[in-house]
Amino acid sequence: MDKNRLQELAASLETPAFVFDTDILRARAEWVADSIRPAELCFAIKANPFLIKAMDSCVERYEVCSPGEFHICVENGLDMTKIVLSGVNKEYADVRYAMEQGVIHYTAESKSQFWLVHRCAEELERKAEILLRVTNGNQFGMSETDVTELIRCRDQYPCLEITGVQYFTGTQKKEIKKIAREVEYIEDFIRRLREKEGFSARTLEFGPGLGVPYFTKDDFEKDRCLLEEFAKLFREGRPYKLIFEMGRFLTASCGYYITKIVDQKRNDAVNVCIVDGGINHVNYYGQNMAMKTPILSFFPQHPIEKEEEEWTVYGSLCTTADILLKKLLLRDARIGDYLAFHNIGAYSVTEGLYLFLSRRLPGIYRYSEQEGAKLMRGGLETYPLNTWNQEAGRWKN
């Protein structure tokens, strides 16, 4: 949205608040989808579950990594055949429930998880499709040995069809050479499975972890170049379907976080602003103690009368760690003015320290030029979650 509209929203919404621009979201998702065709696009909903409905026309699949995320999909009426149930620590009741709801696609993070999906499929007399996740040395996925063993015995699983492999090593990769090495590795493993085990993969689900720019010193054209370079890695035809799983790369640019200056003072030689938000809401990957400055807008609510000054911006938590910005140049900043953080559409809405100090959760809005701002969730008090009701012997709710 343009700056004038953002300023209008800042003054009209109860702060702190997240605003997600679905016009920006869809435009970016369509650009990504066009760039990677004929590969399919899978949205990792952990990046921002509030955007799943807005993404539905842009993606072929959703990666769901927890029971809670799956319930969000059910409540939003998503097509169950588009869901890939992933993640570690899948439990029997959750896998069975997902299968009963119509989920077909699964990933296996271990041999025991593989057998769990098979058990549920056998009990429900269903046929499920499963991808074997290959580890890169962390807690996710399986070793080549375990993957190969499951493939070698694939005739023993009448209710499961191993359709291929899944591979993802991490996020915020900004150099194509690293991604190219990962592509080379996983495709070599697929080739070895074909030559040694007679297994022809039908699907490769690959998470490139493409980096996105956040801070004032970042190159905001580099993510476009990175996607173009990534797409070139797959221009030659493959004998299997390609699915690219993305979260941050799709959603980061569509989000704004709006917070209001609620107090000011001068501590020694430092101008201090206190805002009604804080690090419990603002969470940029790679940010640490305000060492980097994200893109933001300042919206004064009064006639400007003073020159620019440097301000240090703190949130409302009782900890010295709650520092958002250092040496921020603001012109005539006053109590009641607004700061709007840009490019905060990924993870912050769920990844912050939301229960710390029992502060109120921000309101969440979606915005489009056609509909304007629509409330998705009002601000919520968190103190009931941190309170023990001794008389009732239970948690308050």
Image: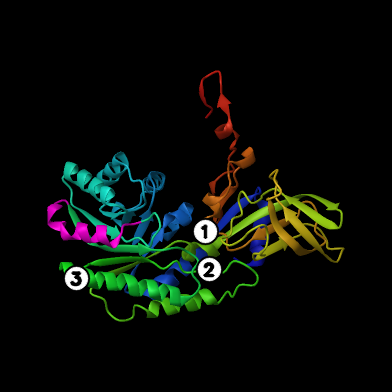
Which label's residue is closer to the chain start, 3 or 1?
Answer: 3
Q: Main secondary structure of the magenta part?
A: helix
Which label's residue is closer to the chain start, 2 or 3?
Answer: 3
Residue 148 in sight in this render: yes
The amino acid type found where label 3 is placed reads Arg
Q: Is residue 315 left or right of residue 86?
A: right
Look at 18% across and 43% down and name the residue there: 124
Q: Is residue 381 above or below residue 266?
A: above
| Residue 165 point in image, percent of width and height | 28, 63
Q: Is residue 147 left or right of residue 317?
A: left
| Residue 375 point in image, percent of width and height | 55, 49
> In terms of image quadrants, where is residue 240?
bottom left
Kindly indicate whether the residue at mark 1 contacts the one at mark 2 (C-beta within 8 angstroms): yes
The amino acid type found where label 2 is placed reads Val
The magenta stretch is 141-159
Provide the residue designation for mark 2. Answer: 212
Provide the residue designation for mark 3. Answer: 194
Residue 359 in sight in this render: no
